[in-house]
């Protein structure tokens, strides 16, 4: 929520009036000249760049029609000048931040005096663009019940194909000082409409309704379409210009927000002011919200492995701990059995300790795993056993006190686990050669836990399995999060992705360990998998695969099927399974059961790989 310092409205009005009439210039001539000057209009405040040319200045009697009123959160209203100029780069709308609940209504013609500012949602360190606004306002209602300025249509014909201009190298990559080119760049197009009354027609939902009452649509139905209806984020250059976040102006108590899944349609007209927020950038805050027409999307089910196939899966179960409702355990268990067809080995990420986020030094996850494996058996699945290494308290990142870690589940009726001097949190597993074959010194064991790359992050868990007489090495990973990275709508273009540095070092550590296994036995069956927290085209993925040590199996899928997570309307890859050269033939499935749906048991889709060792 924005904050403002208390200040006398009367003093502000007097200063604004003095500035507007030129009295502070110190001469009667100046005052006389100012009176005859054109009044300040909204497009004068917005200007032709992202930063108002009047920032920090008082303005008086700025006229507009109220197009939207927000009574919660960042309270205020949007107003728009119905008398537009002929410059597409200058917005005709602006947000008036009132702090308290506004006393105006949609359709009011108002005059506003106040301070022009640039508010950065999330703070300057976030890298977010700013919202031009008028704060500390003095508002006069001139008349009510006026027709609203006609909404500007946002559609596939109006949004440019290029996403953003390159940032100015002399300004640390910022685009703030660049003149807007709304016919050339999507971000410039949206910025030139900031604060204005806009509308979209029937649009495809590409991001399901979330707990914060928002969803994502695309106004470009053909743009990088995923097989199941989303929009694929396939490179750093495919930001998907048609994506737009949708919220509503009406309080939820007054009007519940519709529940939508990916592939549904938001039909009819959705109309309201175009805002910018820290959780997705440009957002249509709907005064009039279209109707959700449900699609036919259902959770996927992978096929069961054949008798001679080993099925290995990865699943981020989103901070699972015994204090979670039994329903979460049951739903996750049902997914393992019915949607994943009971894989032989499951690498779990985000298993929390026995009391979850209670920060009391507990690190064991025995209760969590007992409860989860019992739920799997109750759902008709196998009696999985588990192997893990408990972390040191609060040393692996994640929720404080939660002590998330990776865990191997395995079906002892199909696969055996080779126990070798199980390591503890600080003990590194190594590679030795036994009878011409590679083996681990500790199984289960952690890879290079003292490496600074793993500071405040989950250490990889390595285990040695045997399936039909063949040894398979599995490395379960949960790389550092993307926290701290700037969003795609950042003021810096390209955005700063600071978190990549750590993941690159983590990938290099795992790649080095895999190369040790392959040096001991070039035909070793090695699988590295988990929540890599990075894309299949990223430097992280390239470092994992370096030298041909591993292959990102998701690349075997058609591009329209490559995703495990949906973020801000972009279907993208975060979870991966990578294979060593000996695993030449396999079947890969990104099993879409969560990411596309409003009702989720986790925010990640699990991955399954089947092969014959």
Image (cartoon, rainbow, N blue to C red):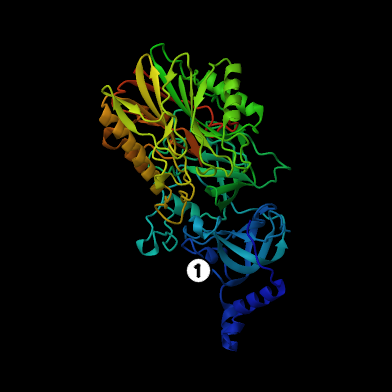
Question: Hey, which quadrant is residue 81 in on the image?
Answer: bottom right
Residue 537 in view, yes or no:
no
Q: Nearer the viewer, residue 135 or 121?
A: 121
129 relative to 269 in the view: left or right: left
Pick the quarter of the image with the C terminus: top left
Residue pictured at 58% horizontal, 29% vertical:
366
In percent of width and height, residue 123 lies at 54, 58
Q: Nearer the viewer, residue 435 or 169?
A: 435
482 relative to 197 in the view: left or right: left
Question: Hey, which quadrant is residue 580 in on the image?
Answer: top left
Pick the quarter of the image with the N terminus: bottom right
In percent of width and height, residue 448 lies at 39, 40
In the image, residue 49 above or below residue 517: below
210 relative to 534 in the view: left or right: right
Neighbour tally class for label 1: few under 14, some 14-19, many 20 plus, Cα within 10 Å: some
Q: Nearer the viewer, residue 136 or 40?
A: 136
Dot 1 falls on a residue whose secondary structure is loop
Tell which residue pokes out farthest to the front in this image. 421
In percent of width and height, residue 561 lies at 42, 29
In percent of width and height, residue 182 lies at 44, 54
Which residue position is annotated with label 1? 53
Q: Nearer the viewer, residue 40 or 452?
A: 452
In the image, residue 418 above or below residue 324: above
| Count of numbered tags | 1
Residue pictured at 39% horizontal, 63% vertical:
171
Residue 378 in view, yes or no:
yes
């Amino acid at each position: 929520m924005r904050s403002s310092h208390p200040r006398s409205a009367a003093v502000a009005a007097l200063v604004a009036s003095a500035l507007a009439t030129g009295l502070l210039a110190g001469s009667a001539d100046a005052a006389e000249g100012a009176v005859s000057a054109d009044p300040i209009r909204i497009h004068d405040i917005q200007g032709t760049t992202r930063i108002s040319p009047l920032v920090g200045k008082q303005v008086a009697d700025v006229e507009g029609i109220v197009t939207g009123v927000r009574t919660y959160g960042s309270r205020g209203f949007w107003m728009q000048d119905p008398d537009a100029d002929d410059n597409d780069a200058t917005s005709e709308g602006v947000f008036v931040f009132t702090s308290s609940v506004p006393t105006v209504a949609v359709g009011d013609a108002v005059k506003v005096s106040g301070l022009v500012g640039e508010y950065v949602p999330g703070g300057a360190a976030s890298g977010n663009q700013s919202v031009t606004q008028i704060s500390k306002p003095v508002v006069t209602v001139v008349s009510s019940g006026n027709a609203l300025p006609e909404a500007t249509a946002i559609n596939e014909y109006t949004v440019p194909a290029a996403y953003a201009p390159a940032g100015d190298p002399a300004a640390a990559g910022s685009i703030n000082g660049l003149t807007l080119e709304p016919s050339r760049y999507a971000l410039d197009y949206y910025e030139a409409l900031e604060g204005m009354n806009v509308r979209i027609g029937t649009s495809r939902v590409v991001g399901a309704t979330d707990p914060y009452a928002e969803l994502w649509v695309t106004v470009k139905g053909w743009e990088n379409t995923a097989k199941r209806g989303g929009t694929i984020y396939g490179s750093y250059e495919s930001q998907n210009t048609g994506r737009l976040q949708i919220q509503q102006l009406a309080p939820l108590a007054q009007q519940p927000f519709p529940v939508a899944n990916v592939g549904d349609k938001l039909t009819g007209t959705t109309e309201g002011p175009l805002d910018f927020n820290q959780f997705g950038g440009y957002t249509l805050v709907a005064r009039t919200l279209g109707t959700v027409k449900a699609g036919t999307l259902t959770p996927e089910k992978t096929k069961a492995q054949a008798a001679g196939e080993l099925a290995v899966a990865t699943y981020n179960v989103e901070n699972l701990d015994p204090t979670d409702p039994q329903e979460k355990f049951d739903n996750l268990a049902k997914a393992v059995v019915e949607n994943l067809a009971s894989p032989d080995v499951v690498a779990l990420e985000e298993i929390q300790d026995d009391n979850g986020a209670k920060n009391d030094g507990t690190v064991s996850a025995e209760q969590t795993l007992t409860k989860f494996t019992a739920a799997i058996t109750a759902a008709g699945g196998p009696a999985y056993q588990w192997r893990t290494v408990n972390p040191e308290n609060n040393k692996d990142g994640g929720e404080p006190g939660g002590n998330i870690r990776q865990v191997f589940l395995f079906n002892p009726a199909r696969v055996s686990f080779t126990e070798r001097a199980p390591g503890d949190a600080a003990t590194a597993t190594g590679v030795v050669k036994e009878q011409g074959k590679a083996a681990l010194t500790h199984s289960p064991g952690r890879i290079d836990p003292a490496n600074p790359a793993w500071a405040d992050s989950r250490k990889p868990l390595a285990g040695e399995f045997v399936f039909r007489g063949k040894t398979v090495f599995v490395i379960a990973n949960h790389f550092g999060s993307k926290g701290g990275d700037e969003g795609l709508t950042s003021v810096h273009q390209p955005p700063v992705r600071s978190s990549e540095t750590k993941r690159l070092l983590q990938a290099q550590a795992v790649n080095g360990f895999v190369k040790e296994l392959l040096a001991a036995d070039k035909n070793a069956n090695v699988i590295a998998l988990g929540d890599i927290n990075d894309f299949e085209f990223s430097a992280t993925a390239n470092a994992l695969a370096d030298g041909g040590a591993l292959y990102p199996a998701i690349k075997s899928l058609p591009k329209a099927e490559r995703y495990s997570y949906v973020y801000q309307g972009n279907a993208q890859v975060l979870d991966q399974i990578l294979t060593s050269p000996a695993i030449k033939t396999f079947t890969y499935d990104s099993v879409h059961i969560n990411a596309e749906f409003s009702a989720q048991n986790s925010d990640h889709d699990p991955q399954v790989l089947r092969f014959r060792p």
